[in-house]
Image: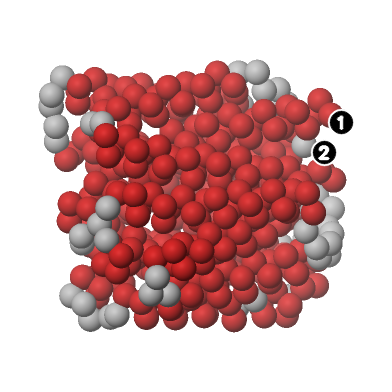
């Protein structure tokens, strides 16, 4: 048991190092665009360049994760992306600068995430005892949050004192460490019966049908769609809110991003030690109520440190949402389907922000909507949506055997 948990945690550490690589580069580019343009539309464009490749490639990555060796898939994908990032860093060092290089780097990170999300989600149930999956996902939340809050902190520090290529070189080094760690992880080969005979489109359709035919997955994914659409203005505009209300310094953007991920670390540690409520519906309801209320308070505060406190608290509640949702999918989905199920989950998570930005950013660009109101209203709606989990608690709390449908 202990050796299995060590192996699973080693996998989470390697995945978090690779995530750190992606986010350090992504934050650096996003902040450069934010500070140089002060434009919601430009922030939306750079965000969409990251998310759109993830959306379109996730279903293909999900099928690959169900068909092929998942460990090799991660190593090969990130080996290619790290090589490309190193190539760009060398070009920058030689003195050649162009915006298309920054944009292409963001697109490359999006391609990497398209592979990472469904593949990692499908590996965890293969290497973790079922009774420990929820705690492991809490550990995963802590590890990922450490990667995420250290990425903006280090990215902001480097951008304040060094050139952009230093960020790229650092990211490459961390990614290589993650890939090297992954080499020591033991991942059993999953069963892949009839998949090889089907077309990619057929495999994707089968994954969608499985979700439709599963009562708990329908319930969970309907909320996931709702949440990603409603939360998009908060994610998109919080940096613009900081710049307009409190100042344009790098350190403010760094503290803004870091506080949220530090909150996620704190929440993940608590959840890992506590284990959460026995009923998943209660964990999810508490997460929605707490995150929504704290997000609404971001728009109410007029003091920067009060704002940072509620940004921190919104992060604290997120592991209560992420870990139970991940565990539900991992423990109730057969191994032959997990890649495609997580691919659909990834598509939903990446589609919400581009759709929301397309609707909100042009209005905010023309000052047609007060930025605080655009953040306050979604926060309130998310808090009220906690009732959804109480209404559907029977579908989320009943334990199903693999492959069983309601």
Q: Which residue is drawn at 41% across and 56% down?
A: 256
Label 1 secondary element: loop
| Residue 119, above or below 49 | above
- Can residue 53 be seen here? The reply is no
Image quarter in which the N terminus is found? top right
How packed mark 1 is, by other alpha carbons closer than 10 Å (few <14, some 14-19, many 20 or more), is: few
Q: Return the x and y of residue 309 as percentages of the image width and height.
A: 51, 64
Nearer to us in this view, 363 or 113: 363
Instruction: Name the colouring of the figure.
Output: secondary structure
| Residue 128, above or below 185 | below
Nearer to us in this view, 351 or 152: 152
Q: Residue at x 79, y 53 (%)?
A: 275
Nearer to us in this view, 344 or 16: 16
Residue at mark 2: 129
Asked if the residue at tag 1 contacts the one at tag 2, i.e. Cβ–Cβ closer than 8 Å, the answer is: yes
Based on the displayed image, in which of its 4 quarters is residue 185 positioned?
top right
Q: Which residue is drawn at 68% across and 66% down?
A: 284
Image quarter in which the C terminus is found? bottom right
How many numbered marks does the figure carry? Answer: 2
Label 2 secondary element: loop
Residue at mark 1: 1
Classify residue 116 as left or right of residue 374.
Answer: right
Q: Return the x and y of residue 223 as percentages of the image width and height.
A: 59, 69
Marks 2 and 1, how far apart at CA: 8 Å
| Residue 146, above or below 227 | above
Nearer to us in this view, 250 or 97: 250
Q: Return the x and y of residue 10 as percentages of the image width and height.
A: 67, 28
- Can residue 188 be seen here? The reply is yes
Classify residue 13 as left or right of residue 358.
Answer: right
Which disc is residue 309 wearing?
none
Label 2 or label 1, whichever comes before in sequence order: 1
């Amino acid at each position: 048991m202990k050796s299995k948990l060590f192996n699973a945690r080693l996998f989470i550490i390697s995945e978090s190092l690779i995530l750190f690589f992606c986010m350090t580069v992504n934050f650096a580019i996003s902040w450069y665009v934010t500070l140089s343009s002060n434009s919601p539309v430009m922030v939306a464009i750079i965000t969409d360049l990251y998310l759109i490749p993830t959306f379109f490639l996730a279903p293909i990555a999900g099928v690959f994760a169900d068909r092929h060796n998942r460990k090799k898939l991660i190593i090969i994908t990130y080996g290619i992306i790290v090589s490309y990032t190193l190539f760009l860093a060398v070009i920058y060092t030689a003195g050649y600068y162009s915006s298309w290089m920054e944009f292409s780097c963001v697109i490359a990170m999006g391609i990497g995430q398209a592979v990472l999300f469904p593949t990692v989600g499908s590996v965890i149930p293969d290497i973790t005892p079922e009774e420990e999956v929820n705690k492991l996902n809490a550990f995963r939340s802590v590890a990922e949050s450490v990667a995420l809050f250290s990425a903006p902190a280090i990215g902001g520090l480097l951008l304040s004192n060094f050139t952009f290529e230093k960020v790229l070189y650092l990211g490459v080094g961390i990614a290589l460490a993650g890939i090297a760690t992954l080499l020591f992880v033991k991942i059993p080969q999953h069963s892949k019966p009839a998949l090889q005979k089907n077309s990619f489109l057929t495999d994707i359709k089968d994954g969608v049908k499985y979700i439709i035919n599963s009562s708990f997955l329908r319930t969970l994914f309907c909320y996931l769609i709702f949440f990603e659409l409603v939360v998009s203005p908060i994610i998109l505009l919080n940096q613009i809110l900081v710049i307009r209300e409190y100042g344009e310094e790098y350190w403010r953007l760094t503290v803004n991003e870091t506080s949220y991920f530090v909150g996620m670390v704190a929440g993940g540690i608590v959840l890992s030690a506590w284990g959460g409520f026995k009923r998943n519906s209660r964990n999810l309801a508490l997460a929605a109520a707490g995150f929504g209320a704290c997000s609404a308070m971001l728009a109410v505060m007029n003091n920067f440190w009060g704002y940072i406190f509620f940004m921190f608290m919104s992060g604290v509640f997120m592991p209560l949402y992420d870990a139970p949702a991940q565990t539900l999918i991992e423990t109730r989905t057969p191994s032959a389907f997990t890649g495609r199920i997580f691919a659909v989950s990834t598509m939903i998570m990446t589609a919400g922000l581009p759709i929301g930005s397309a609707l909100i950013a042009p209005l905010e660009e023309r000052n047609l909507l007060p930025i605080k109101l655009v953040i306050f209203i979604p926060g309130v709606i998310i808090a009220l949506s906690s009732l959804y989990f109480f209404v559907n608690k029977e579908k989320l709390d009943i334990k199903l055997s693999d492959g069983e449908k309601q």
